[in-house]
Amino acid sequence: MRRVIIPVIVMAVFAVFVSQAPALTPKPQKGQKIERFTGRVTSISLSDLTMVVESMKVGMTFEIGGARLKGYKAVKNIRTGDRVTVQYVMSQGKATARVITKNKSYRGDSPQGTATIPDDNK
């Protein structure tokens, strides 16, 4: 009986403290709109926790310190050339990423490690 009660108590205490932990990405303030930007990562700085994403020759710089990641395990896994969608809020002239989602390649992009060789002998 003790073997069952002690783990249940430990889990209950853990659940109380974890549910009270603050979120990494703060909720947007009233009047702030969550916007989206989709494009290719052109540069990423792990020391400054910033990322530049370019779409149709327009680039945006995002602060990525507290962003939630979908499709990545950690910020260090984001690579130049990845296609991403960033949900962000503008605050004091800076774009702060809330969610970074890795998108699938498109338009004939070859998976990493393989190449498509065109056949000109037709």
Image: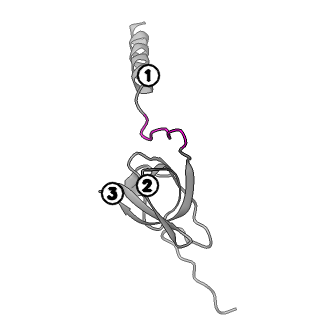
Residue named by callout 1 = 15
Callout 3 amino acid: Leu
Label annotation for residue 93? 2
Q: Is residue 27 magenta?
A: yes
Residue 47: which quarter of the image? bottom left
Q: Between 17 and 71, which is closer to the camera in this rendering?
A: 17
Sequence order check, earlier mark of 3 and 2:
3
Residue named by callout 3 = 46
Question: Which residue sits at x=61%, y=67%?
Answer: 106
In this picture, which residue range is highlighted in magenta? 23-31
SS for callout 1: helix
Label 3 – label 2 distance at C-alpha: 21 Å
Residue 45: which quarter of the image? bottom left
Question: Which residue sits at x=49%, y=38%?
Answer: 27
* Coordinates of residue 39 in the picture (x, y in percent): 54, 64
Callout 1 amino acid: Ala
Left or right of residue 39: residue 7: left
* Coordinates of residue 33 in the picture (x, y in percent): 56, 47
